Image (spheres, rainbow, N blue to C red):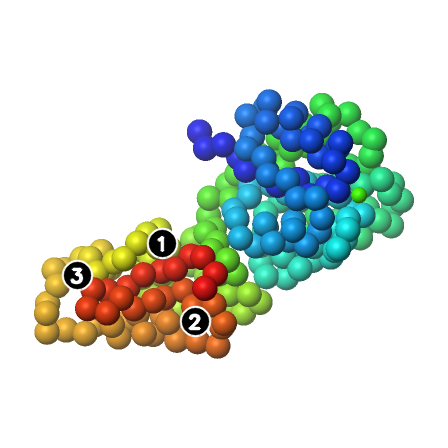
Amino acid sequence: MLKSNILIIEDEKKLSSLLSRALTQEGYSIDIALDGLTGEKKVLSDNFHLIIIDVMLPHKDGLSVISSFRAIHINTPVLIITAKGEIEDRIKGLDIGGDDYLVKPFAISELLARVRSLLRRSSSTVQKTIRVQDLTLDLVKRKVSRGKNFIDLSSREFALLEYFITNKDKIITRSTLCEHIWNYNFDTGTNLVDVYVNHLRNKIDIGYKNKFLKTIRGVGYQFVSKLN
Ligand code: CA
């Protein structure tokens, strides 16, 4: 089974390394961020199955970090850990998109139980979305969003995008696209592929600083997953 990736955003080094050790022992793969901004950057650039986040963090507080990635439709489950046990804070944390709440100090065994429960609850949905940078594909609803914007794609465009993302960063020839998306062999007389790729590019790239689709002259296309 695939290891679940967990991101811990916690500035208390003792606690973050304690959590990291305990979770690694349980078989999870762990990444740590020691402040809010670094944490947010990691959430945006990587795929995590769960985020454990403290509220009081340097540079950007935990609740603001959660709101900002929820605003762009990142639905990764979030476990909030905090020293504040006040009822108002709990409600605020859950209202802005936290999924569960744990008040410090807590027993590691309780944290592990919450982690298991959150991962179990979300395991059905985690596999149903693909995310690259600020682009999200919901494979079940067949919906796409970039940043805060929903993008309307035809089913052919969606299939094309899904194929690009599955083969991200590889150079894909027009004939390969023709075979996989249209199920027929390449007819040298048609510019069908270019037309569709251009439609897709207009929808997902035009107006955005970072471009995903790159034309490889004389060869085909490349979906560039890293920021360019
Ligand atoms: Ca803290």
Q: Which residue is mark 3?
A: 175
Work out which quarter of the rendered image holds the C terminus and state it. Answer: bottom left
Neighbours of disc 3 within 10 Å: few (<14), some (14-19), many (20+): some
Residue 162 visible in the picture? no
Q: Which residue is mark 1?
A: 168
Front residue (pair 222, 202) = 222
The quarter of the picture showing ligand 1: top right
**Amino acid at pointer 3:** Ser
Which disc number belongs to residue 205?
2
**Amino acid at pointer 1:** Lys
Front residue (pair 18, 179) = 18
Q: What residue lies at 77% left-to-right and 38% top-to-bottom?
A: 12
The answer to whether the beta carbon of the residue marked 3 is less than 8 Å from any atom of ligand 1 is no
Q: List x then y, in percent, for residue 106.
A: 80, 29
Work out which quarter of the rendered image holds the N terminus and state it. Answer: top left
Residue 2: quarter of image:
top left
Neighbours of disc 2 within 10 Å: few (<14), some (14-19), many (20+): some
Real-space Cα separation, disc 2 to disc 3, in angstroms: 23 Å
Q: List x then y, in percent, for residue 128.
A: 46, 48
**Amino acid at pointer 2:** Asp
- Residue positioned most to the right: 86
Q: List x then y, in percent, for residue 133.
A: 50, 58
Q: Earlier in the sequence, mark 3 or mark 1?
A: 1
Is 218 displayed left or right of 63 in the figure?
left
Q: What residue lies at 42% left-to-right and 57% top-to-bottom?
A: 225
Residue 166 visible in the picture? yes
Residue 137: quarter of image:
bottom left
Q: What residue lies at 12% left-to-right and 60% top-to-bottom?
A: 185
Q: Earlier in the sequence, mark 2 or mark 3?
A: 3
